[in-house]
Structure formats: structure tokens, C-alpha cells
């Protein structure tokens, strides 16, 4: 499992469409004899499998993170809610130009805000939660003694 995760993280995520499309265009010109006329279908299959594997791994870790934060016992309700949320977000852009516009204008600034403001707030809440758990444990020990 760790080997698969390491290999998936070695595959870069799509940052520029031109680099991916140039590899695809070059692959269309490759011919491997009479049996396989073009190798582009194999590239597309591997690309789609890597995208879904990456999405599954990221989804797993996000759900594990939210399960720890919220102390939810059942995974299924959280999986359905997160999947519906992910589907709605994926259906928002109408075409690829909307996606590139979103990436160039909003995504850069939102990721900076998330990294520098939201993550420290999450760490602060985790610290407060840990302190409360330690106080409860100390109070329970005093009551039983």
C-alpha cells in the first residue's frame, strides 16, 4: 500500500494543460504494428486510473481527518455527504475556460488563505480539544481516588 502511495505522489498533478496535451499528441503518432495502431488509449487509461487512485487516497485521508475531529463513529454517512459535496463542486464549472479562470484568479489566493490562516486555526482547535481531554482525564482520576 505504501508503495502505491509513493508511486502516486511521484506522478505530478495537472498544473498546465499544454504539457499533458503535448504528450498526448506525440503518443497519437506512435504505432506499434498492426495489433495496436496507436498507444494513446493506453495513456488515457493509465491517466484516468492514476487520477481516480489519487482522488481515492486524498478522499480517504480527508475523511479520516474529519472523523478524528468530529468523533463520528460511522463512516458511511460522512462518505455520502463528502461524495455529494465533491460531485457538486465538480459540476460547477461549465467548461474548461471557467476552470482555468477559477484556477488563475481564485485558487491561488484561496490556497494561500487556507495554508496560512485556516490550518493554524485547525491546529489551535486541536490543541484546545487535547487540553480539554487531559482535564477530563485528570478530573476522572481525582473522582475515582
Image (cartoon, rainbow, N blue to C red):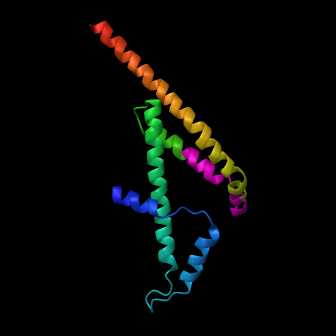
Give the magenta range. Answer: 84-100
Q: Main secondary structure of the magenta part?
A: helix
Q: Quadrant of the N terminus?
A: bottom left
What residue is drawn where x is 35% and y is 14%?
A: 138
Front position in the image: 39 or 111: 111
Check the image and report above or below for 18 versus 123.
Answer: below
- Asked which quadrant contains residue 116, the reply is top right
In reply to whether residue 91 is colored magenta, the answer given is: yes
What residue is drawn where x is 56% and y is 87%?
A: 29
Residue 1 visible in this rendered orientation of the protein:
no
What residue is drawn where x is 58% and y is 71%?
A: 20
Residue 130 visible in this rendered orientation of the protein:
yes
Front position in the image: 126 or 92: 126
Residue farthest toward the left in the current orientation of the protein? 145
Percent position (x, y) of residue 109?
A: 68, 48
Percent position (x, y) of residue 33?
A: 45, 92
Q: Quadrant of the C terminus?
A: top left
Percent position (x, y) of residue 69?
A: 47, 32
What residue is drawn where x is 40% and y is 21%?
A: 133
Front position in the image: 94 or 124: 124
In reply to whether residue 145 is colored magenta, the answer given is: no
Percent position (x, y) of residue 97?
A: 72, 62
Amino acid at each position: 500500500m505504501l508503495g502505491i502511495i509513493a508511486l502516486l505522489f511521484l506522478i505530478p498533478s495537472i498544473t498546465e494543460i499544454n504539457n499533458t496535451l503535448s504528450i498526448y499528441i506525440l503518443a497519437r503518432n506512435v504505432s506499434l504494428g498492426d495489433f495496436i495502431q496507436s498507444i494513446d488509449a493506453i495513456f488515457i487509461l493509465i491517466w484516468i486510473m492514476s487520477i481516480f487512485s489519487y482522488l481515492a487516497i486524498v478522499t480517504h485521508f480527508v475523511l479520516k481527518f474529519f472523523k478524528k475531529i468530529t468523533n463520528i463513529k460511522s463512516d458511511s454517512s460522512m462518505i455520502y455527504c463528502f461524495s455529494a459535496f465533491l460531485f457538486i463542486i465538480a459540476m460547477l464549472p461549465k467548461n474548461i475556460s471557467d476552470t482555468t479562470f477559477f484556477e488563475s484568479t481564485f485558487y491561488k489566493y484561496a490556497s494561500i488563505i487556507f495554508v496560512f490562516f485556516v490550518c493554524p486555526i485547525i491546529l489551535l482547535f486541536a490543541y484546545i480539544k487535547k487540553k480539554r481531554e487531559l482535564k477530563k482525564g485528570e478530573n476522572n482520576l481525582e473522582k475515582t481516588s
